[in-house]
Amino acid sequence: MIRIKLLKYFSSTINQADRQNFNKIQDWWSVGGSMAPLYSYNHLRVQFIHEILNRPQKGKSLAGLHSLDVGVGGGILSESLRRLGSKVTGIDVSENSIETAIQHKNTDPELNDSDLEYKLISIEELSKNQEKQFDIITAMEVIEHVENLPLFIESLGKLLKPDGKLFISSINKSYESYLKLIIGAEYIARVVPQGTHDWNNFKTPEQVWLQLNKQKINIDVLRGVEYNLLNGEMKYSNNETQYIMACSKQKME
């Protein structure tokens, strides 16, 4: 069991209630388990990254790049990025999530190297200690689980290279998201563990844009996405109940 003490700051992005919820998840890599929708979403996320970076969707398409995956969970996206050739640093504040990611990585010789590294650390603490910036930063399905969105976005901005790309996906704060993703997904269909989401902590794209703009980061592409409960597929949608965005720093004149 990993025992790493997370330092407490007056200003922190750590939502302790959500952190404890993620510490209870045991089936990150279980086929047909509670995290199953993430597998479908992960395919779409990787496709989106390839499209934005204009890279072919085959081979080691991300070779030569260093990615930061924020909120790794069990390591699903981190492993995908590494398999595509990127060096990957994955962080999370859940001890259970980091343990799961490390254990799964260790089962595959292709991944068990220093180019896929996991750290139990908050984004703000990493931004204080990390000397180098990243080519790619992913914060997928994370901001609805953090406190202090301004500090979170500020920390992302510090870690992003001037010519790097930031990818964010999250859930819009709307009545529709409450009905679909909490009542529907958690309590009726039960494809997501009950208590995973707190509607009060959902963020609208406008709220995210406001904080990105303060850090001189542009939203280049914003798309709605939706999960089909009937066939288990994630696809793009005109509805922004859930959304994914690609961002870049404003060029200095």
Image: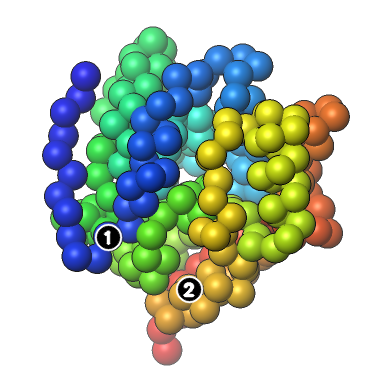
In the displayed structure, does residue 21 sit left or right of residue 206?
A: left
Residue 126 on image: x %, y %: 24, 53
**Which amino acid, by three-letter code, is at mark 1?**
Ser
| Residue tagged 1 | 12
In the rendered image, residue 214, in percent from the top left (x then y), is placed at 43, 81
Closer to us: mark 1 or mark 2?
1
Q: How is the image coloured?
A: rainbow
Q: Which label sits on residue 89? A: none
Lateral position of residue 170 relative to residue 183, left or right = left
Residue under the point 68% across and 29% down: 191
Residue drawn at 33 percent across, 68 percent down: 151
Query: How packed is label 2: few (under 14 Cα within 10 Å), some, or many (20 or more)?
Result: many
Name the foreground residue: 181 vs 39. 181
Question: What is the residue that sits farthest to the bottom in this orientation?
Answer: 253
Percent x, y of residue 134: 36, 54
The residue nearer to you, when weighing 150 against 111, is: 150
Q: At numbered mark 2, what does the secondary structure look like: helix, strand or loop?
A: helix
Q: Which mark is residue 212?
A: 2
Q: Position of residue 250 (x, y in %)?
A: 48, 78
Which quadrant, please, contains the N terminus? Answer: top left
Report if residue 133 is visible in the image.
no
- Residue 202 left/right relative to 10: right
Give the Cα distance between marks 1 and 2: 18 Å
The reply to whether residue 151 is in sight is: yes
Q: Is residue 183 above or below residue 169?
A: above
Q: Considering the numbered disc 1 on the image, is that residue within a helix, a strand or a loop?
A: loop
Relative to 216, say whether 17 is above or below: above
In-front residue for pair 58/229? 229
- What residue appears at the point 19 percent right and 65 percent down from the top-left corner? 10
Q: Residue at x 71, y 54 (%)?
A: 177
